Amino acid sequence: MLKLFEHETLDVHNLGDEETAISVEALSLQFGNKPVLQDISLRIPKQRITALIGQSGCGKSTLINSFNRMNDLVPDCQYSGKIFIHGRNINDKREDVSQLRTQVGMVFQRPNPFPMSIYDNVSYGLRLKGVKVRRYLDDAVEQALTEAALWDEVKDRLFDSARILSGGQQQRLVIARALALKPDILLLDEPTSALDPLTTLFIEELMAGLKKRCTIVIVTHNMQQAARVSDYTAFLHQGQLIEYADSDTLFTMPEFKQTEDYITGRYG
């Protein structure tokens, strides 16, 4: 499997703290009386792409949403266990969730640009943090749009509405909006499922470049995409973590028959 950026393969079951971006310990979660995640433990390595795969309803999106406390917005969400980022248990009630979401950016399945200009979309988070110096904002917007491979396409219309952009451009704009805050971790929940194949490939190449500076966790239903872009893959089934390994191993020599059945299309 050819990767755009190769890394030394790590043993994800024995990562040291200095190699770990997210450490999940015995995480269980339910909405009301409905269990969604059951005793999940894993360590996600820094500056790598980790894919979460599994059939619909297996808990992938719930797990990724746990990494920046988005599940708090769901009524009657209850959870136990710990998630450590930067040495802090983010499930602690004293955690500053606003600060957490600055460090852990989120991009959803469908592009959701704000009803404002391209420039204002990208600078929105910085303005919320109190940044007002125009020169700083200009530089930050240009850098984020460049990192999202969008600058050359929009630099002459920064103050036009973001709604004029194509779907693929809007998704890159949303990524730029997250990158403007310089997150250490970028969460992508099926970021290409609503895009055409050519734009999907463009986003995948973008991810391969971004992992040089931040950790990426992606939820995807697309087995080929997970195999192409991810360094590590976790397979979930009915709220449980079945298998977690480097992607080359998981897709070519899965340890469990349940994993093999899923990746070969026997169910899911």
Image (cartoon, rainbow, N blue to C red):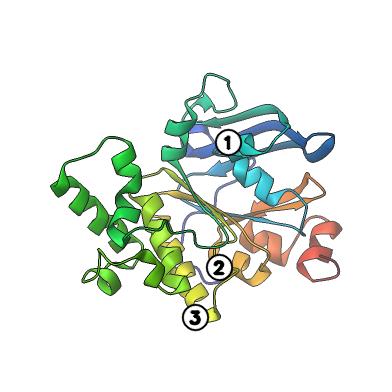
Counting from the top left corner in percent of width and height, residue 92 is at 58, 21
Q: Amino acid at mark 3?
A: Leu
Q: Is residue 148 visible?
A: yes
Q: Which residue is mark 2?
A: 192
Q: CA distance from mark 1 to mark 3?
A: 32 Å
Label 1's element? Answer: loop
The local crowd at label 2, few if under 14, some if 14 to 19, many if 20 or more residues have their Cα within 10 Å, is many
Quadrant for the C terminus in the image: bottom right
Counting from the top left corner in percent of width and height, residue 264 is at 79, 71
Residue at 25 percent of width and 65 percent of height: 158
Q: Is residue 84 above or below residue 54?
A: above
Q: Which residue is mark 3?
A: 198
What number is the disc on residue 69? Answer: 1
Label 3's element? Answer: helix
Q: CA distance from mark 2 to mark 1?
A: 23 Å
Residue 148 lies left or right of residue 238; in this view the side is left
Q: Amino acid at mark 1?
A: Arg
Residue at 24 percent of width and 38 percent of height: 131
Q: Amino acid at mark 2?
A: Thr
Residue at 31 percent of width and 60 percent of height: 117
